[in-house]
């Protein structure tokens, strides 16, 4: 019997841990990840592996340099999650160095220079995605139509590595725009929506994910299911996803209602691009989002508004990464102003007045 | 009656099944009892016995000192062996002044004088008798009950709330008491209603104790003033502040008292003790204690004389296994870790636990990921994560501004922290530092006052000297003038 008399209460715990939370998120991402890999073949798997590996190595290196416990730091699973999230947001046939540079940037600049897990201001994966998009616009916007694993058009294992290593001619002539990119280009040429969409967009296919796009972002349904499961497991709360998606829905519906030929319909907005992944898996990153439920709602609304603005009037067809990173910057401010009211105190922190006496309460 | 709600809270596994099924048993009188003089909030009791003196069961050993204090009585007949220091259930683990009583096994009661009818006494007299019986809050707060009754009557409370929530995991002593001695408790409640002159009482019990709810409902059926309420089980429902909020929707104002809301909260054990004191003239000399935990061979509820050692209780329950990693007095959420099992049971001890590693759930803490679970769990609406950050930065005014004084250390935050950050330890540290700061400040103020007084004294002396000198000068001048005049 070896008792510790100095232990602090409580002497019980609900059994939750950081690695368990990260594990839940990874598990929830699994269907969308597998789907993306099947849809885009060997190069997608290679890119996923390279990106994750880069993240893990950089994390280990930084922990070692900082003189921290490397094994313990790696076990929380946050670097693994960053790697997976980044890979899912990349074009599936992007060359290996995109994954390595992105992964390294996410971990070293996005996280470790701030002090490691829990200290970063911006979501590391989204910071890396923004950096890659700004620095390597060609590689980051080279999309292709689905080429499922066992179909004739899929690259073989060797061809897959040739694509990942950037030595393949297969990438030529396969590129097309994502639906958001296409809508944006065509609207820029003053073509009305009803002429733009046919042949490029079918809501059912977009929901299932049978379309061109980032590695793991195409299937809105699988991501939604994963996100709902996360809520059910209480790994995330409803506040951010619901606020973000409903803001998006309200904005897209109202503008579509006013001017249907100039603005894409709300369903297209919800089903395409990174919105679902962003709402359930990226904006909900606990480290970079507000800590109070009220703050999380404000944060979600902000993300939704920014995504819509960027998609509709900004310089890029997709704005989830920019929106999340911008809102990350406001998190400290939101946390400062939106606080719960303390029991027995007014919102201003003064003791509440003594309630009226002599009156028996409702019974 | 419509229940309101309180914010936050957690749902720790009850673990009450370990001990709740077994009826209360009496612990055989241990050979020696150790009675700390400080078993209550306020001033320690003052011993009035001497070493070697023989005392009867229920005899006064130490009297209350000051307005907020409680006397101490002999739990059995025997001989006073020592009045000295002994390990006490106190956070510091430091010994406290303690009376050691050796039992003679005769259980010889002193002459008792119960009133023929407690309701013929004036409310003040009832409170005086409650105070003289040494009764303090049995839920663990240890506040002298008589003081609470008096203040509540003066404040004119309209409802007496009897707290049978027992929200701490493992604890089942109140559950057993309510199941087995419901009529006695209801009698105690009636006496307390008389003492505070309140028109009604509510008995609040968590719905994980259906037998207790049933027993209490049956016992108070004839008294229309008393109502039993079943509460949803959620920690910390048994905290007075949350209980008041749950029942009325009102909040105790910060820095105020529960009675500000018109309610007075007392524990069921206190009601039972009041019944014993006013019906049989018995002072508070024993209580029901839950002995439980994964490392205890046969968990159960015992009726224990005050001053029995936790070790005596564990021994009666089959001993503590080798897998025990923590000994606690009280529940796992707010209980006090014990340095050793040789620590006495006091008036507020609702349980002693021996927990295994699996139950304690200890874990290395990892960096905070700002998940907000602590904010969600806090029943007081605080930001534990920010408070811990302030404590880490040693920003003591910052942590005060965040509401450290409103924290009641219920532990909901640390219980639900996935990073296993010892949040309560940070808060306790900050409290210690702030207390130290206040001590330093009052010391500095005193020194400054003494310095000022000294300077004023010097100034007065200087002035007196100057005046004396001036007088002398004047007298001399006068003499000279007189002399000159004489010369003329």
Image: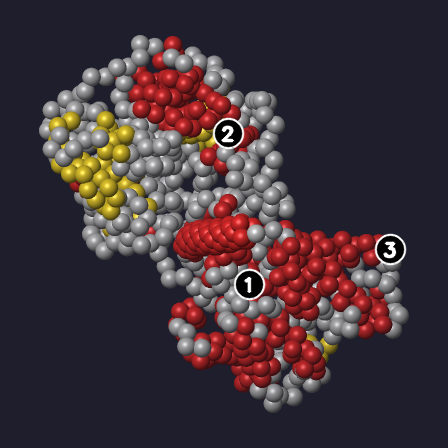
- Point out the frontmost of discs 3 and 1: 1
**Chain under label 3?**
A
Q: How are the colours assigned in the image? A: secondary structure
Q: Does B117 sit above or below residue B139?
A: above
- In this rendering, do the residues under marks 3 and 2 share a single chain? no
Total residue callouts: 3
Q: Does B408 sit above or below residue B63?
A: below
Residue topped by disc 3: A258
Q: Considering the numbered disc 1 on the image, is that residue within a helix, a strand or a loop?
A: helix
Residue at horizontal 25 percent and vertical 54 percent from the top: A3
- Point out the frontmost of discs 2 and 1: 2
- Mark closest to the chain's N terminus, 3 or 1: 3
Residue topped by disc 2: B259
In the rendered image, residue A346, in percent from the top left (x then y), is placed at 62, 42
Residue topped by disc 1: A287
Residue at horizontal 19 percent and vertical 42 percent from the top: B84
In the rendered image, residue B97, in percent from the top left (x then y), is placed at 24, 41
Quarter occupied by residue B348: top left
Q: Considering the numbered disc 2 on the image, is that residue within a helix, a strand or a loop?
A: helix
**Chain under label 2?**
B
């Amino acid at each position: 019997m070896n008792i510790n008399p100095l232990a602090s209460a409580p002497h019980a715990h609900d059994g939750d841990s950081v690695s368990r939370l990260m594990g839940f998120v990874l598990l929830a991402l699994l269907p969308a990840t597998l789907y993306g890999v099947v849809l885009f073949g060997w190069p997608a798997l290679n890119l996923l592996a390279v990106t994750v590996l880069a993240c893990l190595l950089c994390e280990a290196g930084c922990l070692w340099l900082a003189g921290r416990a490397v094994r313990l730091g790696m076990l929380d699973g946050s670097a693994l999650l960053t790697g997976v999230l980044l890979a899912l947001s990349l074009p599936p046939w992007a060359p290996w160095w995109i994954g390595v540079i992105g992964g390294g940037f996410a971990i070293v600049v996005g996280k470790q220079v701030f002090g490691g897990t829990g200290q970063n201001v911006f979501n590391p994966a989204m910071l890396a995605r923004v950096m890659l998009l700004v620095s390597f616009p060609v590689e980051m916007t080279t999309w292709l139509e689905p080429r499922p694993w066992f179909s004739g058009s899929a690259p073989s294992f060797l061809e897959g590595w040739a694509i990942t290593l950037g030595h393949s001619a297969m990438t030529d002539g396969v590129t097309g725009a994502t639906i958001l990119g296409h809508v944006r280009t065509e609207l820029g040429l003053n073509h009305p929506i009803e002429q733009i969409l046919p042949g490029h967009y079918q809501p059912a296919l977009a929901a299932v994910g049978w379309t061109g796009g980032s590695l793991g972002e195409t299937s809105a349904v699988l991501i939604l299911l994963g996100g709902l499961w996360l809520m059910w497991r209480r790994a995330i709360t409803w506040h951010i996803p619901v606020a973000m998606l409903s803001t998006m829905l309200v904005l897209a519906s109202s503008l579509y209602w006013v001017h249907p030929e100039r603005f894409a319909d709300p369903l297209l907005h919800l089903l395409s691009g990174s919105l679902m992944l962003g709402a359930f898996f990226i904006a909900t990153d606990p480290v970079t989002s507000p800590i109070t439920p009220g703050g999380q709602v404000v944060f979600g609304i902000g993300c939704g508004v920014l995504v819509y603005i960027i998609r509709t009037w900004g310089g890029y067809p997709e704005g989830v990464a920019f929106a999340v990173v911008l809102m990350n910057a406001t998190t400290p401010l939101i946390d400062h102003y939106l606080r719960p009211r303390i029991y027995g105190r007014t919102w201003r922190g003064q003791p509440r007045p003594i309630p009226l006496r002599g009156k028996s309460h409702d019974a | 009656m419509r229940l309101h709600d309180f914010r936050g809270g957690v749902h720790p596994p009850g673990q009450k099944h370990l001990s709740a099924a077994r009826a209360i048993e009496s612990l055989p009188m241990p050979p020696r009892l150790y009675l700390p003089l400080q078993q209550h909030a306020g001033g320690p009791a003052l011993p009035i016995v001497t070493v070697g003196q023989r005392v009867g069961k229920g005899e006064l050993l130490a009297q209350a000192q000051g307005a907020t204090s409680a006397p101490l009585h002999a739990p059995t007949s025997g001989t006073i062996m020592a009045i000295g220091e002994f390990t006490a259930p106190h956070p510091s683990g430091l010994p406290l002044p303690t009376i050691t009583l050796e039992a003679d096994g005769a259980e010889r009661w002193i002459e008792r004088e119960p009133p023929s009818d407690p309701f013929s006494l004036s409310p003040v007299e009832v409170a005086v008798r409650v105070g003289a019986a040494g009764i303090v809050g049995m839920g663990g707060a240890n506040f002298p009950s008589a003081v609470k009754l008096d203040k509540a009557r003066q404040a004119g409370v309209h409802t007496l709330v009897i707290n049978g929530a027992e929200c701490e995991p493992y604890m089942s002593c109140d559950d057993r008491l309510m199941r087995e001695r419901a009529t006695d408790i209801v009698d105690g409640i009636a006496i307390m209603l008389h003492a505070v002159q309140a028109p009604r009482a509510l008995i609040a019990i968590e719905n994980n104790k259906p037998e207790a709810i049933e027993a209490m409902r049956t016992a108070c059926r004839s008294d229309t003033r008393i109502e039993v309420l079943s509460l949803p089980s959620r920690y910390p429902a048994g905290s007075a502040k949350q209980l008041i909020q749950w029942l009325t929707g009102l909040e105790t104002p910060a820095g105020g008292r529960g009675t500000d809301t018109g309610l007075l909260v007392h524990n069921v054990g206190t009601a039972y003790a009041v019944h014993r004191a006013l019906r049989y003239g018995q002072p508070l000399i024993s209580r029901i204690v839950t002995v439980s935990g994964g490392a205890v061979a046969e968990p159960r509820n015992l009726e224990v004389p005050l001053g029995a050692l936790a070790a005596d209780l564990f021994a009666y329950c089959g001993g503590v296994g080798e897998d025990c990693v923590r000994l606690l007095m009280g529940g796992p959420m707010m209980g006090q870790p014990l340095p050793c099992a040789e620590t006495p049971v006091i008036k507020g001890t609702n349980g002693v636990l021996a927990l295994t590693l699996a139950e304690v759930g200890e874990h290395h803490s990892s960096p905070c990921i700002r998940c907000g679970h602590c904010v969600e769990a806090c029943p007081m609406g605080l930001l534990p994560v920010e408070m811990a950050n302030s404590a880490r930065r040693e920003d003591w005014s910052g942590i005060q501004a965040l509401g450290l004084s409103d924290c009641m250390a219920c532990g909901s935050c640390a219980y639900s922290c996935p990073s296993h950050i010892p949040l309560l330890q940070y808060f306790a540290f900050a409290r210690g530092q702030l207390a130290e700061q206040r001590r330093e400040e009052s010391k500095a103020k005193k020194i400054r006052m003494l310095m000022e007084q000294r300077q004023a004294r010097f100034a007065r002396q200087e002035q007196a000297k100057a005046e004396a000198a001036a007088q002398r000068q004047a007298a001399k001048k006068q003499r000279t003038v007189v002399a000159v005049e004489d010369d003329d």
